[in-house]
Image: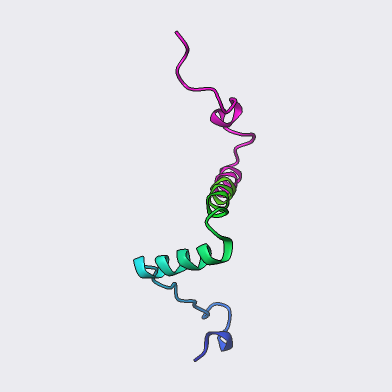
Amino acid sequence: MPCWLLSGSERRFPVPNLGIPELLIILAIALVVFGPGKLPDLGKALGTGLREFQRSVRGEEGPPASENRPSGASDQTAR
């Protein structure tokens, strides 16, 4: 029976298997659609969004200490 005809508790959506060939096809389509110059920016934005989502789910407030320091600063102190 098609899943859209089932009631809410009986409705199941199978999770597709994503292997290496499927991921390569998705990457190739993303490369064609967005171009090689935009892919790093999209990856960075996606990572930042996921980090913020995880932080909000955990109930943390504010950016972590590593995001508070300037981009040129390092963990090692100058001697």
Image check: 41 left or right of 22? right
Percent of width and height locating residue 46 = 56, 51
Q: Residue at x 53, y 51 (%)?
A: 43
Residue in the foreground of this view, choosing between 55 and 5: 55
Q: Residue at x 55, y 47 (%)?
A: 44
Tell me the quadrant of the picture where the C terminus can be found. top left
Q: Residue at x 58, y 31 (%)?
A: 67
Percent of width and height locating residue 65 = 56, 28
- Asked whether 76 falls inside the magenta stretch, the response is yes
Image check: 54 left or right of 17? right
Image height check: is 64 above or below 31?
A: above
The extreme right residue here reads: 62
- Asked whether 29 falls inside the magenta stretch, the response is no
Percent of width and height locating residue 33 = 57, 66
The image quarter in which residue 21 lies: bottom left
The extreme bottom residue here reads: 1
Residue in the foreground of this view, choosing between 29 and 53: 29
Q: Residue at x 49, y 76 (%)?
A: 13
Image height check: is 21 above or below 62?
A: below
**Magenta stretch bounds:** 50-79
Percent of width and height locating residue 27 = 46, 63
| Color style of the picture | rainbow
Image height check: is 27 above or below 7?
A: above
Residue in the foreground of this view, choosing between 35 and 5: 35
Image height check: is 70 above or below 24?
A: above
Residue in the foreground of this view, choosing between 62 and 37: 37
The extreme top residue here reads: 79
